[in-house]
Image: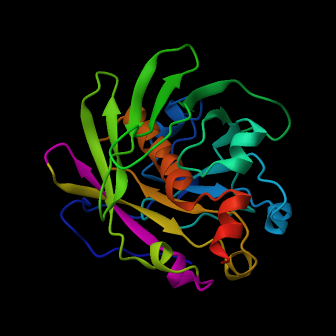
Amino acid sequence: MQYHYPQANYFPQQNYVSPMQMDAGFNSGLDALSRCPSVFIKQRPDYLETLGLCEKKNAYFVYQSDSMGNKPDFKQQAPIFKCKEESSCWQRNCLPGACRGFDLKVKQYNERQDTNTVFRMSREYKCTFLCFGRPVMEVQLENGGKIGSIYYPFMCCDKGVDILDENDQIVYQIRGSCCQWPFLVNLPCETCQRARFDIIDSQGQKISELWKESAGFCNALCDVDATNFRLLFPPQSSSRQKALLLSAALFIDFNYFEESPQDKQNNQF
């Protein structure tokens, strides 16, 4: 399915550019993000989890998308990154996604061999209650250099996160209304699985969007853990800022759309 956005003042006038037309020279490390106007994040589905026996480690594939944010052709296009969770078994199966600690390593994708880590995300376990003990995820280069952090603030109604740079200054905020179908009821239709998050700059202006997308009717009907995101990068954003926005999208998945087997059992009653 292709999406076409109405022209808005936060999307500059631009011609359609397909991923195949983009500069292939920028394909290593953070440079892989430097010429991407948008990415599509696809979580690897695990059908054994539908039995409710064990929560396995999450894995995501990041695809370069076109200038309009359309879903790529997965058969014709390889991912640019693979993100793999590292966490303890007891935290995955006993704690909700918003509390458990984890590391996410983002590696250059290569289906034939293991590659070096480009950057990583780390979140410690937090016992969160209202405004106390709010989770923070650190984003670092493989050599230990800090890119920034993602903060999960307490909000009564809205959903979202704050994105801070290496100096702990807010560069973006991501906000979505709680009155959207995925936050109200779990239905398998694609429309009922989509949620929009606005990307807001430090001046309070909306400059882009993040969309939580359907993983397909059959996956949703069988309650398969497979969340997809469509991320349109703000104009003029740097590769480091894009890495933070990518990290924020994954952080949102853990906070709002990740359930342990105990959560799923409790939701049935």
Q: Residue at x 67, y 34 (%)?
A: 108
Rendered location of residue 117, percent (x, y): 65, 26
Hey, which quadrant is residue 232 in on the image? bottom left
Which quadrant is the C terminus positioned in? bottom right
Q: Residue at x 50, y 59 (%)?
A: 256
Rendered location of residue 247, percent (x, y): 49, 41
Q: Residue at x 39, y 68 (%)?
A: 196
Residue sitting nearer the eye, 222 or 210: 222
Residue sitting nearer the eye, 266 or 109: 266
**In this picture, residue 58 sits left or right of residue 233:** right
Which quadrant is the N terminus positioned in? bottom right
Hey, which quadrant is residue 187 in on the image? bottom right
Rendered location of residue 166, percent (x, y): 34, 23
**In this picture, residue 173 sits left or right of residue 221:** left
Question: Where is 42 relative to 166, above or below?
Answer: below
Q: Mark yes or no: residue 235 visible.
A: no
Question: Where is 250 relative to 109, above or below?
Answer: below
Query: Where does the magenta region start and end?
Result: 187-203
Q: Residue furthest left?
A: 203
Hey, which quadrant is residue 162 in on the image? top left
Magenta region includes residue 192: yes
Question: Where is 56 relative to 3, above or below?
Answer: above
